[in-house]
Amino acid sequence: MTVTPAADLATRLLARLRDVPDFPKPGIIFKDVTPVLADGALFRDTTEAMADWYRGEGITRVAGIESRGFILGAPVAQHLGVGFVPLRKPGKLPYDRRRVEYALEYGTDTLEAHVDACPGDRVLVVDDVLATGGTAEAACRLVEAVGGMVVGCAFLLTLGFLDGERRLEGRAVRSVLRL
Ligand SMILES: O=P(O)(O)OC[C@H]1O[C@H](OP(=O)(O)OP(=O)(O)O)[C@H](O)[C@@H]1O
Ligand SMILES: Nc1ncnc2[nH]cnc12
């Protein structure tokens, strides 16, 4: 895991991230990124930093994890000049799909991708938060199941105490901020 040396960006993010206790379940302190997204300069600088790490890595597709991974992944794809593919919650994609199931910090969930989402692509997986790593690990498996090669994973925030990095061992994982 590499954390960006752009300390000022991390400081700006820390000032904007909002802790919401007991959401979506008692005992969870939810890291709310909506104030970051609402700050235009911070939103741009964050997604540019996430894209910059992977310039020169031959990325041909960005895969964003529903739902906040869509919001961050689409501008990352635009900064890199490549296409975007959505990894979606079940029942949302219209065409032929593959699916993977995974455990969350607060339950279980499923991700789906179109079978032709990223054949032969060099893929960057993007999400807002790396917590237990279940979602991102499932996203990587799903990308591989539809023929993509995962070059790396980029996050705005890693919750280090939940040890998600262990689930992604061997992958190029980067995060703007690590708490
Ligand atoms: O590392 P993990 O423990 O797997 O958790 C991380 C995931 O949890 C959150 O998504 P959530 O399930 O809340 O979905 P949402 O983005 O649709 O709200 C977050 O956006 C990540 O996708
Ligand atoms: N505590 C948390 N805050 C925001 N997103 C999360 N995803 C999993 N755990 C989370």
Image (tube, helix red, strand yellow):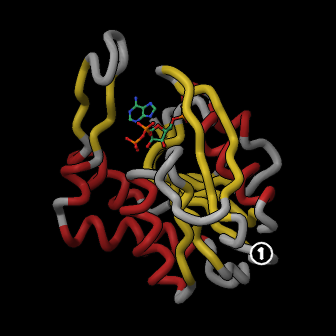
Q: Is residue 162 above or below residue 43?
A: above
Q: Residues within 10 Å of mark 1 (few under 14, many from 20)?
A: some
* Residue 161 at least partly seen: no
Q: Which quadrant of the figure has residue 134?
A: top right
Q: Please provide percent x and percent y for residue 86.
A: 52, 63
Q: Is residue 2 above or below residue 78?
A: above
Residue at the image position 56 percent from the left and 69 percent from the top:
85
**Amino acid tagged 1:** Pro
Residue at the image position 27 percent from the left and 40 percent from the top:
32
Residue at the image position 40 percent from the left and 75 percent from the top:
75
Q: Which quadrant of the figure has residue 150?
A: bottom right
Numbered-mark total: 1
Q: Nearer the viewer, residue 132 or 63?
A: 63
Q: Is residue 95 above or below residue 176?
A: below
Q: Quadrant of ligand 2?
A: top left
168 to the left or right of 110:
right
Q: Residue furthest top?
A: 26
Q: Nearer the viewer, residue 14 or 124?
A: 124
Q: Please provide percent x and percent y for residue 82.
A: 57, 85
Q: Please provide percent x and percent y for residue 146.
A: 77, 63
At numbered mark 1, what does the secondary structure look like: helix, strand or loop? loop
Q: Please provide percent x and percent y for residue 157.
A: 45, 46
73 to the left or right of 60:
left
Q: Nearer the viewer, residue 119 or 166?
A: 119
Q: Is residue 73 above or below residue 11?
A: below
Please name the residue that numbered disc 1 is placed on. 119
